[in-house]
Amino acid sequence: MKIAFFSTQPYDTAFFESANQAFGHELAFFTQALDPATLSLAKGAQAVCLFVNDQASAPVIEGLRALGVQTIALRCAGFNNIDIEAAKLAGIRVCRVAAYSPESVAEHAVALLLTLTRKTHKAYNRVREQNFALSGLLGFNIHGKKVGVIGTGNIGQAFCKIMLGFGCEVTAFDLIANKEMEALGVKYAPLTDVLASDIISLHCPLNEQTKHIINAETLGYCKKGVTIINTGRGGLLDTKAVIDALKNGTIGALGLDVYEQEEKLFFKDLSNTIIQDDMIQRLMSFSNVLITGHQGFFTQDAMEKIAVTTLDNITKLDQQVALATGNTVV
Ligand code: NAI
């Protein structure tokens, strides 16, 4: 089967070509993101493979249907960028990789957290300039702190386990309490209680209920100086409200792997351009904000699993075989 890959980077090509030796599909890699102007690249393909910032809106899905595309295979877990109703109407199947390596993202959230709490990003630069002074580097222990987790699916659970290992008191907010987490000592509580933690980490999907779950009102429930880590999706935070909260000290530290307007920025080398996005420029101006460009998933282990599972999903859908739990979206 011919599969058209959008938004590809050299590492996507390498991992998918290697995994495809066991499947034998015809793979066409395009660097362009999927949108109305680029969808014609899918001509002749039965499946398209998309990533987090490809936009499969209703008109794009209609265009894909007209080209004969039968499957949209996401090489990621989130599917907020797909118009699900339009896909259903068009009879296009949508699959994803529900759990490739939740630890990869959970560990990245912890990397952001530890960097911010011990200021190793500042120390690294200082020591390189032979400045061994400690003033300004005072951190705080994670041990004994109250950690609030929003969303305890695959990634949230991996994160909770690490935080329990650090000796934290972990409370969580989710639509469904997870029994395994409760048995390990995680306490489920209303969102307002979970927000009153020393550290908050977001691991829920972006949807109508969770868009701007961190906003001016909900920030009012936070402890002054709270550390917030977001490796979920940028839209979970109302960025403007977050900037205000950083300015008035409500947020003491912020670790972001995702950003509300990341489509125009992330996965690109923009070092020789003038960035027009004033919000990210403002965020980058705070010394207590650490931003990475959506790299939580980016480990050798996760990339291998993503490539194999994506190709397996496409193959199974073609053969009308049921997918592994959670991988079917439509
Ligand atoms: P999952 O589907 O296993 O878990 C999501 C959890 O969020 C579920 O327990 C669900 O009940 C809960 N949830 C749904 N709606 C909620 C609401 N309104 N309030 C509170 N909880 C709610 O997903 P997984 O694999 O844990 O991934 C979570 C998110 O992480 C993904 O949706 C994606 O946006 C993001 N992600 C980020 C990556 C990165 O590289 N930074 C990589 C992979 C995923």
Image (spheres, helix red, strand yellow):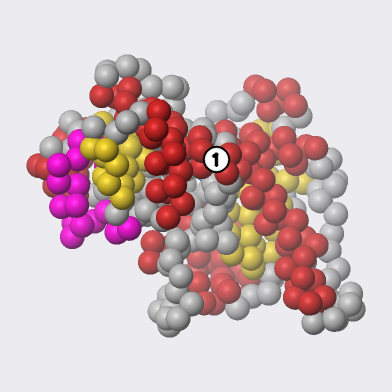
Q: Quadrant of residue 71?
A: top left
Instruction: Report whether 177 appears left or right of 294.
Output: right
Find residue 105 and report its image quarter.
top right
User: Which residue is the extreme one toward the top?
Assistant: 321
Q: Residue at x 19, y 40 (%)?
A: 45
233 or 75, which lies in front?
75
Residue stretch rendered in magenta on the structure? 31-48
Q: Nearer the viewer, residue 303 or 209?
A: 303
Q: Residue 210 location, x and y as percent?
A: 47, 46
- Element type where label 1 sits in the image: helix
Q: Main secondary structure of the magenta part?
A: loop
Q: Position of residue 15 (x, y in %)?
A: 46, 43
- Image location of residue 40, percent across then percent down: 15, 52
Residue 279 at x, y = what percent?
48, 73
Let me know if residue 92 appears in the view. Answer: no
Q: Look at the image and tell me in which quarter the N terminus lies.
A: top left
**Can residue 125 be seen by looking at this rendering?**
yes
Check disc 1 and report the residue beneath it. 302
In the orientation shown, which residue stands out farthest toward the left?
Answer: 66
Mark 1, residues whose alpha carbon is within 10 Å: few (<14), some, or many (≥20)? Answer: some
* Residue 283 vs residue 297, the one in the foreground: 297
Question: With respect to residue 52, does 274 lie above or below?
Answer: below
Q: Is residue 215 left or right of residue 189?
A: left
Say which quadrant the C terminus sits in.
top left
Q: Residue at x 60, y 78 (%)?
A: 285
Q: Quadrant of residue 16?
A: top left
Magenta span includes 218: no
Residue at point 77% right, 46% down?
146
Q: Horizontally, is 220 left or right of 294 in the view?
A: right
Q: Is residue 32 magenta?
A: yes
The amino acid type of the residue labelled 1 equals Ala
